[in-house]
Image (cartoon, rainbow, N blue to C red):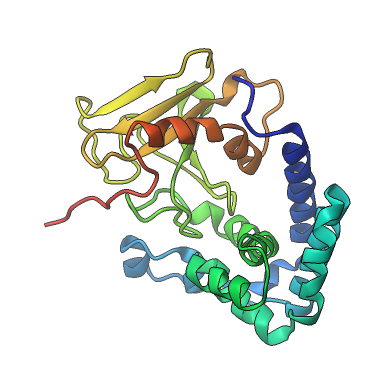
Amino acid sequence: MKKSVVSKEYQNLQKKIVKLQEQWKQSLNREIIQPKLDKAAIEAGVPAAALTTIDFDITLFIQWIDEIKRLLIENNGELEQKLTKLDSLLNEETAIRWIDEAFAFNEIYFKKYAEENGLEEWVPQFLAETALRPFLQLTAEVLQEQITEAVPGAGCPVCGEPVRLAQLEENGKKVIHCPRCQAHWPEKRIMCSHCGNNDHNEIKYLKIEGEATSQLQVCEKCHGYVKVIDTRQFISKPSSAMLDLNTIHLDFIAQENGYKALAGKAETN
């Protein structure tokens, strides 16, 4: 694979965060996840996590945010003054709101929160999302056997994250992986994840110079794209989150060519 455009320093930071998230997930009791799946809602594209009762431990959520802050400060001492301000801001009520808004991808809320509290714009959403993921990952783990497909255009069937990463696995099988909750599900090789188009004349592949294991699958109907990585050739397969990060240059190339990871659902009669 081509050398990542992401700095080694940031890659190492993300590896530490992914490791922390795995430890946090392992510390959770699976009984906090109580699925209440509704077939009609799932078929309409509602994320399974939205139909699941998750017993969030707010104290633990706040503790995890504190651990992330310490990790960020260890990585970059200049962040200490910017992050310690949150010590007096993050209470139980705010943490509950952060969980709700992070789950809903509410960037507007977090941007406003940052402005109102004198924080850098990226800080609140990054911390909330990072601490939310172990709960989502456990939810995906509990539900994985029931996740056999996704509704085109609805994103990840567990958490709703836009589809952008596929892996070619055993026998060349195309499997979509969610970097956010780690859910995965099979998909037809010639099919658009965003609109369901399976016309081989409209599903094309962009080969990237110097990329032996990576390509972009693009749809000329909805202009959506998915990064397709042949991980069969990897000696050591990274997590979906790290694979997504290390192939971010493919996202840039796709977007520069007019494709997007948020496209329309398949039209229905």
Quadrant assignment, res 21: bottom right
Is 5 on the left or on the right of 255, as rendered? right
How many discs mark residues in the rendered view? 0
Q: Quadrant of residue 83?
A: bottom right
Query: Is 226 left, or right, of 181 in this rendering?
Result: left
**Quarter of the image that includes the C terminus:** bottom left
Q: Quadrant of residue 96?
A: bottom right
Report whether residue 53 is seen: no
Question: Where is 22 relative to 54, above or below?
Answer: above
Residue most extreme to the bottom:
93
Query: 208 above or below 163?
Result: above
Does residue 134 appear anywhere in the picture? yes
- At x 39% / y 33%, what residue is drawn? 256
Q: Return the x and y of residue 103 as percentages of the image width and height.
A: 54, 67
Left or right: 65 with respect to 177? right
Question: Where residue 87 appears, x then y in whole percent?
Answer: 81, 76
Quick check: 133 left or right of 85? left
**Residue 14 location, x and y as percent?**
73, 45
Q: Residue at x 33, y 52 (%)?
A: 153
Quadrant position of the N terminus in the picture: top right
- Residue 222 location (% of width, % of height): 24, 42
Q: Is residue 192 depicted above or below 232 in this figure?
A: below
